[in-house]
Amino acid sequence: MDWLSHMEYNAKQSTIAKYHHIVTKHIIPTLGNVLVADIDYNKVNAFIKEQSTSGNLVNKSALSSKTLKDIVCVLKQIFKFAQTRGYADTFSFELLKLKAPPKDLRALTASEQEILVQYLKEHITYENVGILLALFMGFRIGELCALQWRDVDIQNSLIQVSKTLQRIQNTDKDSAKKTIVIIDTPKSLKSVRIIPIPKFIQDILIDIYQNHSGEDYILTGNAHYMEPRKYQYKFKKRLKQIGLKDINFHALRHTFATRAVEQEMDIKSLSEVLGHATVSFTLDRYVHSSIELKRAGMEKLVACY
């Protein structure tokens, strides 16, 4: 818990809540009674194996690769902190091999996107405009939920992304609320960005802009925000209504990146629009090449023969 107290002055509130959950729900129940100096490779490896097979707090099933990776990341930081305080000797995590998180989010196909966009254009609501912003500008759901009209520069066709909304675990032991909603800066400095608004999105925003104050939220049209979980539910409800396969809201961001690459958008510009730290991350995690794009690329290679 010394490490957690130390991190409270060095990390965002949402990050602290995440660390607190990992430490109290996963690490302490298994390793809490073991001195840091007595923890070796065998103990850590056994802990990771246990978490990978039965670490799910709800049904004791296997944890996702992403959650397991987060736990190991926290362990590394705890050990590094312990070493700087002289509590433990050097310990290497290099021998611990974790499976890479699966790329389980897919991009919409061109035909699916066409069906969705046609529906959204025929049914302009605040919530549907948010879907269009994700699909054609790459917004994350938390960024959309925090987006207000004061962030939109209609005259210059720009949107400023400077905050995100999320519900996190409440680390205040004296509070009756288990979770709280916070509006904070995005996940990284690169995520704070300015995005140009496409012309047809600009026209839609102008139509619904009238009589709104800067404090009004885009997704609701008033001074009350909508939480990501509720917006995710509404999005999935729309998919079912249209007759499209169920996808996660974040797949719209993947779709935006994939279409951008298909239209040969400059990768550096795309990475900055998405708010990524590196171009390689954009290509590796967010771009889904279709068979049509692969075929076109192959044909270009032999076009001169």
Image (cartoon, rainbow, N blue to C red):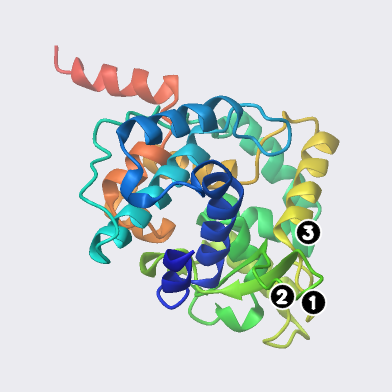
| Res 148 visible | yes
Q: In terms of sequence position, does the residue under pointer 3 or pointer 1 come before the other?
A: 3
Asked if the residue under mark 3 is in contact with the one under mark 2, i.e. CB atoms within 8 Å, the reply is no
Q: Along the horizontal axis of the image, is 43 left or right of 120? A: left
| Disc 1 residue type (three-letter) | His
Whole-angstrom CA distance, mark 2 to mark 3, is 16 Å
In this view, 50 is above or below 81: above
Q: Nearer the viewer, mark 3 or mark 1?
A: 1
Q: Residue 254: percent from the left, percent from the top?
A: 50, 42
Q: Residue 4: percent from the left, percent from the top?
A: 47, 66
Q: Hey, which residue is sitting farthest right in the picture? A: 241
- The residue closer to the viewer here, 270 or 15, is 15
Q: Secondary structure at mark 2?
A: loop
| Res 193 visible | no
| Disc 3 residue type (three-letter) | Ile
Q: Residue 165: percent from the left, percent from the top?
A: 63, 68
- The residue closer to the viewer here, 164 or 209, is 164
Give me the residue at 54% from left, 41% from top. Answer: 30
Please rate how many residues cluster around mark 1, counting C-alpha atoms within 10 Å: few if below 14, some from 14 to 19, many from 20: few
Numbered-mark total: 3
Label drawn at residue 124: 3
Q: Along the horizontal axis of the image, is 48 left or right of 152? A: left
Q: Residue 258: percent from the left, percent from the top?
A: 45, 39
Q: Secondary structure at mark 1?
A: loop
Q: Nearer the viewer, mark 2 or mark 3?
A: 2
Q: In terms of sequence position, does the residue under pointer 2 or pointer 3 come before the other?
A: 3
Label drawn at residue 224: 1
The residue labelled by disc 2 is 217
Asked if the residue under mark 2 is in contact with the one under mark 1, i.e. CB atoms within 8 Å, the reply is yes
Task: Tell me the quarter of the image containing the C terminus.
Answer: top left
Give me the residue at 14% from left, 17% from top. Answer: 304
